[in-house]
Image (cartoon, rainbow, N blue to C red):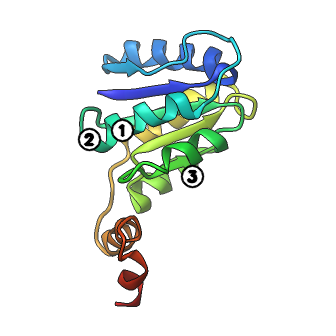
């Protein structure tokens, strides 16, 4: 299950992403928004991120004007590693090395064709683990009250 969330600036591109996921046979849950009426991206990013963090959804796709604000909001939820990607290499690298569980994109930055390629790469690229897991563990430790001490180990 893929969690989807966008603001008004990402609404049109999100419709294309939904259609693409349907064509791939991948299930998704839409956490909004559901129109191009002005809204605040944290209101939609947070519930989608909570669904990914809890395991209700496997990964998430977020879209706003730049992809930056909605990623910042999602990253406030413990366990979320949302990466804003505007190219295929970054989408692949953030999965392989960062085990990103949410992809953020900017509808005012990307065309539909490139955005859908980025989605495909993000959804099909595995995490490499190995030395990268140590780094993910340190990121997770930062979310805890003793996160600063974890970096000193």
Note whether 30 is above or below 35 in the view shown.
below
| 83 displayed left or right of 39 | left
Q: Which type of secondary structure does the marked residue at label 1 adopt? A: helix
Quarter of the rendering occupied by the C terminus: bottom left
Residue 83 on image: x %, y %: 53, 49
Quarter of the rendering occupied by the N terminus: top left
Disc assigned to residue 90? 3
Of badges 1 and 3, nearer the viewer stands 1
| Proximity of marks 1 and 3: CB atoms separated by less than 8 Å | no
Q: CA distance from mark 1 to mark 3?
A: 24 Å
Labels 1 and 3: the sequence-earlier one: 1
Of badges 2 and 3, nearer the viewer stands 2
Q: Residues within 10 Å of mark 3 (few under 14, many from 20)?
A: some
Pointer 2: what residue? Answer: 54
In the picture as drawn, the residue positioned furthest to the left comes out as 55
Disc assigned to residue 21? none
| 69 displayed left or right of 71 | right
| Proximity of marks 2 and 1: CB atoms separated by less than 8 Å | yes
Residue pictured at 43% horizontal, 80% vertical:
148
Q: Residues within 10 Å of mark 2 (few under 14, many from 20)?
A: few
Pointer 1: what residue? Answer: 50
Q: CA distance from mark 2 to mark 1?
A: 6 Å
Residue pictured at 70% horizontal, 32% vertical:
110
| 135 displayed left or right of 10 | left
């Amino acid at each position: 299950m893929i969690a989807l969330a966008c603001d008004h600036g990402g609404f049109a591109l999100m419709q294309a992403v939904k259609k693409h996921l349907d064509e791939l046979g991948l299930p998704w849950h839409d956490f909004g928004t559901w129109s191009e009426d002005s809204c605040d991206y944290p209101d939609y990013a947070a519930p989608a991120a909570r669904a990914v963090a809890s395991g209700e959804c496997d990964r998430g796709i977020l879209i706003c004007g730049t992809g930056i604000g909605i990623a910042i909001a999602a990253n406030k939820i413990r366990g979320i590693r949302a990466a804003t990607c505007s190219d295929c290499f970054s989408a692949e690298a953030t999965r392989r090395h960062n085990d990103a569980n949410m992809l953020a994109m900017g509808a005012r930055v990307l065309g539909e064709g490139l955005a859908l390629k980025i989605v495909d790469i993000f959804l099909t690229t595995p995490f490499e683990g190995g030395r990268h897991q140590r780094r993910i563990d340190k990121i997770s430790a930062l979310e805890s009250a003793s996160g600063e001490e974890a970096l000193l180990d």
